[in-house]
Amino acid sequence: MKRIISLLNLVALLAILLLLYGPLAKIGLLPSLSSLLRGGAPKIEDTPVIIQQIKNIAQMFTQTFYDEYVYDTGVMRTPLFNQDKRLIFIAKGEVISGFDLSELSEKSIIRRGKSIVVKLPPARILDVVINPSGFETFIEQGEITFEESKKFHEDARRIFDRNARDKGILKNSAEQGRQMLEKFFRLLGFDSVDIIIPESR
Amino acid sequence: MNTEPQKKPRARKRLLFLGAVILVLLAINVAVPRQKAMPQLSARTLKDLAELATVEYSVTKIVSYKDVAWYGDRKILFETAATVKAGIDLNELADQDIQLEGDSAVTVSLPQPRILLFNMKPEQMREIFNESGILRSDFSNEEKDGLLSQGEKDIRAKVATMDILERAARNARILVESWLKKMGFTAVRVVFKEKRGRT
């Protein structure tokens, strides 16, 4: 009986230590227990990078929109006995817009002596970039599958695209393209430069 | 004198006291919320660019991680893909980089090419394998992002050692030459600037 009580005392002391550690880890004064058990940063295996395709392109980037967004999935109810799910992450990335100059044809450039007319295609969003390093998990509750998380990441990209359009990226992109090409053609000795850019949809 | 009967209640009292402390600490643990610094979001910004991308590489990589421990293993495997675009930054083009010789001859000195864009789209990623031992926790979303970030870093490093910049330079030369010829220049020379001198 004496031994059992001593053992219980020891267990209780250990539990107290753990319970004292918990709140201190929660407020960030100590590292979390799970991170202590996990050890050092995981390291992926060295695997090759394989080229699938090489494409010649002619894209003129004229505008970038840097964005940061806090994405909250809200509480996702799961069947009885399963923990509800929620994911909050911060997405950081950029939207690039400009012109696809491969759409230029012979007819797109008209030169008459010292004057030139260039018809560009409409400015458009060329890339929305949020790389894995641009995602930072803030709160993760319940088991969120990779496919679910991928869906949220794709949604964040759509939000970036929409925010960039709302901020007027296409209008700015067209204006910057016009200024840039005008400067370039004047350096080439043209006195009159006319850049025609259709309005973006 | 026999002290045993006195010791027993003392030990029990201590146990009761420790039990009470545990209960109080449990309550504190439940009450203290997990604190995480609120993210500081910077302002959304639009910025002018003047870049000409001339080559696009599509690459793939298997991101694999094995966490081996005596109490069980965890293994995960992803298939990832990235698009890398390289070209020239036309902001580096100065007035003196365009030399006209009459109305029909021109020499253009272009800046050295560089990687302009790196994009790993989520829709091109796939989790192929994911297994955790019975005593191990599953891979969290945060851990998966961390592993994919390492994959991203590795792709960036390996693509930089490929011939992407040489191809970007070759394509930029062809592109600029063809545009200038369309504009009516008959003698076009495109060279690349170096940090010192020209090539």
Image: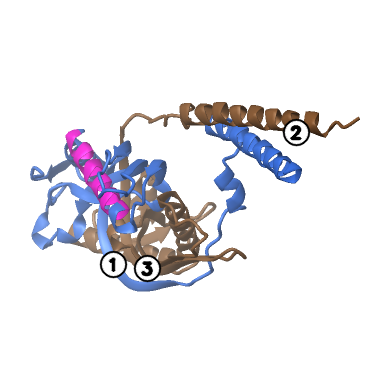
From this view, report whether residue B152 is shown above or below residue A175. below
Q: Residue B71: x and y, percent?
A: 59, 63
> Within the magenta stretch, is there residue A121?
no
In space, the residues marked 1 and 3 are separated at their CA atoms by 15 Å
Look at the image and give the residue range highlighted in magenta.
Answer: A149-166
Indicate the position of residue A54 as horizontal and vertical percent values: 32, 70
Within-10-Å neighbours for mark 3: few <14, some 14–19, many 20+ = some
Q: How many marks?
A: 3
Q: Nearer the viewer, mark 1 or mark 3?
A: 3
Q: Which chain carries label 3?
A: B
Up-down relation of residue A24 to residue A148 (above or below) = above
Percent from the top left, x then y, of residue B176?
Answer: 28, 59
Q: Nearer the viewer, mark 1 or mark 2?
A: 2
Q: Is mark 1 on a helix, strand or loop?
A: strand
Question: What's the residue at 35%, 42% (across, down)?
Answer: A91
Q: Mark 1 points at which residue?
A: A56
Tell me, for residue B148, which label it has, or none: none
Chain depicted in blue: A
Using residue B154 as the reference point, say whether residue A77 is left or right of it. Answer: left
- Give the amino acid at mark 2: Lys
- Cα–Cα span, label 3 and label 2: 73 Å
- The quarter of the displayed image where residue A195 is located: top left
**Kind of residue at badge 3:** Val
Q: Residue B8 carries which label?
A: 2
Quadrant of the image for the N terminus of chain A? top right
Residue of label 3: B59
How dense is the environment of label 1, judged by Cα within 10 Å: few (below 14), some, or many (20 and up)?
Answer: some
Give the residue displayed 29% in from the left and 58% down from the top.
A147
